[in-house]
Amino acid sequence: MNKKGGVSKPGQNGSCYYLEVQHEIKGSCSLKNWWNGSPNPTENFMIDFSSEFGSRVGQELKSRKIIWLTTIGPDETPQPRPVWFLWAGTSILIYSQANAHKLRHLENNPKVALNLNTDESGEEVAVFLGEARLEPSVVPADKNPEYIEKYKDGIASLEMTPAEFAADYSIALRVMPAKLRGF
């Protein structure tokens, strides 16, 4: 296995082979040709979470409650915002309000960046680059047990029930990572 971060396709020679490895700072993972029009564009692809960097990022994707989603505004200015998310194994699921600016941004440019917060000294950087798309077939937030378990306290702090939250945050977005870099 690649110990510095990489992308693998299961099944080659009984394990994995690496399509592309880029090293930016201390680690990077990249998926080539991830968007091919198939319903699951990363089918057969995965980020290598066996490296030290990949293992840390994998744990953070499971435990962190906030990720920063950056879209591109109409004036081509990056527009970062903190969002709740759910790591779905090969993609990141985000529920949005129907009138959110990010949806209009994504209509014009689906490219996004997702950043996990660093530690206090600016270490432990993880940045995903990819594209986002609407996912109308995804179950509403209140019917997604993993999402509700992760955010039940946050939903309660908004003084909403899960059903009210799902009605307000009714648009599902899926971000398909094409690249992961960081240290």
Image (cartoon, helix red, strand yellow):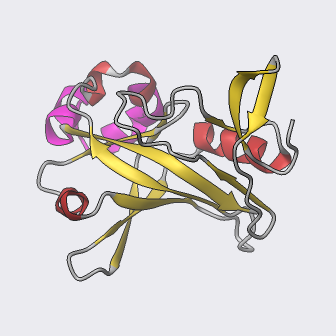
Name the foreground residue: 14 vs 130. 14
Residue under the point 42% across and 36% down: 151
Image coords of residue 20 (percent x, y): 70, 50
Residue under the image location 35 percent in, 27 percent down:
39
Q: Is residue 92 left or right of residue 18?
A: left
Residue drawn at the location 74% of the way across and 53% of the way down? 21
Quadrant of the rendered image containing residue 105: bottom left
Residue 50 drawn at (x, y percent):
81, 36
Magenta: predominant secondary structure element?
Answer: helix
Give the quarter of the image for residue 23: bottom right
Q: Which residues are magenta?
A: 148-169
Give the x, y percent position of residue 106: 25, 58
Name the quadrant of the N terminus.
top right
In the image, is residue 90 above or below residue 101? above
Q: Nearer the viewer, residue 160 or 85?
A: 85
Q: Along the horizontal axis of the image, is 148 left or right of 100?
A: right
The tally of labels here is: 0
> Along the horizontal axis of the image, is 14 left or right of 92?
right
On screen, residue 126 above or below 34: below
Location of residue 139 with respect to 32 vertically, above or below: above
In the depicted view, which residue is nearer to us: 133 or 52?
Answer: 133
Residue 160 forms part of the magenta stretch: yes
Residue for point 16% across, 61% down: 104
Of 125 and 153, which appears nearest the observer? 125
Looking at the rendered image, the quarter that the C terminus falls into is bottom right
| Residue 144 is covered by the magenta coloring | no
User: Residue 94 appears in which quarter of the rendering?
Assistant: top left
